[in-house]
Image: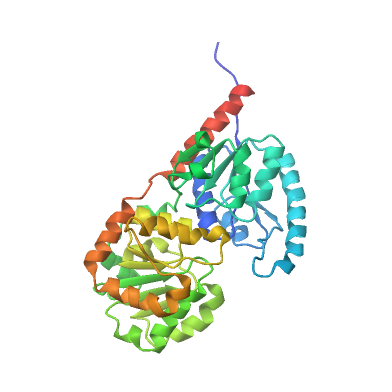
Amino acid sequence: MKDTKPTIVPRVLISGGGTGGHIYPALSIADAVRRRHPEARILFVGASDRMEMKTVPAAGYTIEGLPVAGFDRRRPWRNFGVLLKLWKSLRMARAIVRNFRPDIAIGVGGYASGPTLKAAQRAGVPTLLQEQNSYAGVTNKLLARRARRICTAYPGMERFFPADRITLTGNPVRKELPDCTADAAAARAALGFDPGTPLVLFVGGSLGALTINNAVAEAVESGKMAEAPFSVLWQTGKNESRRCMKIAEAVGADKLKAKPFINDMATAYAAADLVVARAGAGTISELQLLGKAAVLVPSPNVAEDHQRRNAEALTSRDAAVMVLDADAATDLWATVTRLMQNPQERHMLSRNIHGMALENSDEKIADEIDKILQNGTQRN
């Protein structure tokens, strides 16, 4: 007699966001689940005023928003409102879990991840954490006590999490980045630059970085940019775009292009001989996978100073150069100029950072998700 047991349709809850560094890995995980389970029901939970509320629906997924916000470490008197938002978010997260009835809840970091994963764990839903950084945050350390699996991007995370629940997977990156086949000259031409002139990519993340922007602005205003034997592609972030684009006009678009946001990061990376960026986990994973020489400027405005720790995990292996945020005004442009005059050092950085890459991270995380789903099916 033919087996007529019904197919189990997995219900997957994914929570996190706030920046592209959290959203793009979450989308990569969702895509990997959908490739394996086309019928899966996938629901995202994010922060209601952050970029995931637009980015996730644009990728074809449903999202619900929570009013959660990050704590203000510089002005603690403002955190009463943050606590009120957290209380509301916890109530809303419980309702989402109750109504969606997920088979698994996945946390990728970001404001919404804590309330959502906490609500899932209280409801008995198995949870998987994706820790992107080399130094675990407080929320993930608390959630790890009841997590079924913790997927990490760096070795040695036993100092934060139970060793028997850790799987080293790396951080998923946008699939279009490793799939880009354009060489540097073709990529520069596609971006409107001279194909034969080296190029530096300055990128401060999806929201921009004031310190990096100020370093480029000073180089333009002092005449250093005009004298540089390289071109610059400058992602300014939306908040700084008007000021920076006006500054860039003094140089000319054939040598310096300023953009609020770069949609085609695959081509931008392919064109770059050197990348200047913050030290977010997602950015570092992209640099590793693509083997890009980089100058990292860690943001000082993050929990547990984790960006500096991320950068140090590379600099200790001669896989990147770090310029501290406080030193960027005096040191960043000089460091970039030195590296652009030293192709041997750039080649060493490229080789070493690529050696740290962990490939197919989305599929490795999907493997762990499937194991949890299978265990749940067996119990049911």
| Nearer to me, 346 or 330 | 330
Q: Where is residue 37 in the image (x, y as percent from the top left)?
A: 53, 36
* x 43%, y 75%: residue: 328
- In the picture, the quarter occupied by the C terminus is top right
| Nearer to me, 136 or 36 | 136
* x 33%, y 58%: residue: 319
| Nearer to me, 172 or 99 | 172
Q: As displayed, is residue 318 above or below residue 327? A: above
Count of residue discs: 0
Q: As displayed, is residue 158 above or below residue 380? A: below
- Quarter location, residue 270: bottom left
> Which residue is situated farthest in the top direction here?
1
Q: Position of residue 347 (x, y in %)?
A: 25, 61
| Nearer to me, 59 or 137 | 137
Q: As displayed, is residue 36 above or below residue 302? A: above
> Which residue is situated farthest in the front direction here?
159
* x 41%, y 63%: residue: 265
Q: Where is residue 143 in the image (x, y as percent from the top left)?
A: 62, 43
In this rendering, position of residue 152 left or right of residue 333: right
Decide if residue 7 is in sight here: no
In this rendering, position of residue 205 left or right of residue 43: left
Image colouring: rainbow
- In the picture, the quarter occupied by the N terminus is top right
Decide if residue 82 is in sight here: yes
Q: Position of residue 139 (x, y in %)?
A: 62, 50
